[in-house]
Amino acid sequence: MKCPLSKIINPLADARARTFSVKVRLDNELSSGQPLLKAGMLARVTLPVGKPQPHVLVPKDAVVLGQSPTVFVAQESGGKSVVRPVPVKMESAHGLWFAIEGELKAGDLVIVEGNERVRPGQEVRPQTKEIPRPE
């Protein structure tokens, strides 16, 4: 007999981890005579809480925190690459990435290493490096 899917959500959250404990009951099917789910197994689940919305993602290391969060961009100007600060608003975090709002556009070259030491208008020699994007 199939058991109906049931769940219990603990109403108290872990404030530091921003998580809730959840218990879920479901059928444990047999595969080759053995149950698929075994005692002590853990699961990590992500539940969407709204409609997906497109965002510009930047590596967390690209955001300089100060009076207001800023991302520095290497921008072409007169045959040179110069630094331009872009104030941003941080939205959600996903692994090593931040979803941000601001004047930053997809494809802009953001400075990830040494960004704490650059100044607006400073000439730089960008080196592109592919960073794996979240799924």
Image (cartoon, helix red, strand yellow):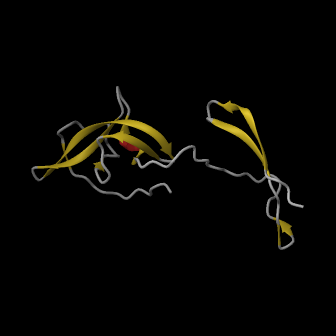
Q: Which residue lies furthest to the left in this view?
A: 78
Relative image position of residue 101 (x, y in whole percent)? 37, 40
User: Would residue 60 be visible to someone looking at this image?
Assistant: no
Q: Residue sitting at 76 percent across and 54 percent down?
A: 41
Residue 70 in the image: above or below residue 27: above
Residue 27 in the image: above or below residue 77: below
Residue 90 in the image: above or below residue 25: above
Q: Which residue lies furthest to the right in this view?
A: 1
Residue 26 in the image: above or below residue 115: below
Q: Residue sitting at 26 percent across and 38 percent down?
A: 85
Relative image position of residue 5 (x, y in whole percent)? 79, 52
Relative image position of residue 117 (x, y in whole percent)? 28, 37
Q: Which residue lies furthest to the bottom in this view?
A: 32
User: Left or right: 11 with respect to 107?
Assistant: right
Image quadrant holding the N terminus, namely: bottom right
Relative image position of residue 13 (x, y in whole percent)? 68, 32
User: Left or right: 107 with respect to 18?
Assistant: left
Count how many numbered circles sit on residues in the image.
Answer: 0
Q: Residue sitting at 32 percent across and 52 percent down?
A: 106
Q: Residue sitting at 34 percent across and 36 percent down?
A: 88
